[in-house]
Amino acid sequence: MKEIKAVIDTNVFVRMLIGKSATLLKLYQAFIEGDFTPIISPPIKEEILEITARPRIKKYFTPLEIKRFKELLETDTIMTIPTKKISLCRDHEDDMIIEAAIEAKVKYIVSLDKDLLEIPSAKLAPLGVKVITPEEFLKAISGNK
């Protein structure tokens, strides 16, 4: 199997951990099984940890699950340090996702965020990256098994 790397947007990362949809459960399973490797950056990691510590999100996890998740972030992801600042997204806080993808030279950003999904492909194609939904990503990685 070809190793696929992708930047998983924070909203998808947190939702796949909570596991309320079949698609996101499949994505989490693919992550656990090593079907792809998530790329994160320090700001993405910080945002994931901050969101999962919020009381309304934290209630979905046991302390052991939170510990395991933090371990997964350390051991089963690749940390990248973006060196270029860009401004492509309506919500400029989402630019950190694109910056990580560009730095790590990944093909996919997996997101449910309209601000990322609605960026014209003509702006992203020269950067070598594509923003896709979790469903589209699962299809892409299943083609590499």
Image (tube, helix red, strand yellow):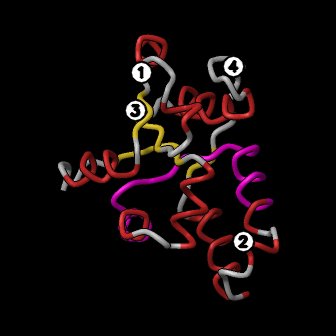
Q: Which residue is mark 3?
A: 107
- At x 27% / y 51%, what residue is drawn? 141
For badge 2, the amino acid type reads Ile
Q: Are marks 1 and 3 in contact (CB under 8 Å)?
A: yes
Looking at the rendering, the stretch of residues picked out in magenta corresponds to 26-50
Crowding around mark 3 (Cα neighbors within 10 Å: few <14, some 14 to 19, many 20+) is some
Q: In front of the other: label 2 or label 1?
A: 2
Q: In screen coordinates, is 50 left or right of 116?
A: right
Q: Decide which of 71, 142 is in the foreground and name it.
A: 142
Q: Which residue is mark 1?
A: 128
Label tally: 4
Place of residue 89 in the rendered image (x, y in percent of width and height, measured from the top left)? 64, 23
Please report whichever mark, 3 or 2, sits nearer to the chain's N-terminal start.
2
Q: Main secondary structure of the magenta part?
A: helix
Disc 4 element = loop
Q: Which residue is mark 2?
A: 57
Q: Are marks 3 and 2 in contact (CB under 8 Å)?
A: no
Q: Which residue is mark 4?
A: 84
Please report whichever mark, 2 or 1, sits nearer to the chain's N-terminal start.
2
Mark pair 1, 4: CA separation: 15 Å
Q: In front of the other: label 2 or label 4?
A: 2
For badge 1, the amino acid type reads Gly
Place of residue 60 in the rendered image (x, y in percent of width and height, measured from the top left)? 66, 80
- At x 60% / y 52%, what residue is drawn? 11
Vertical comparison of 88 with 136: above or below? above
For badge 3, the amino acid type reads Lys
Disc 1 element = loop
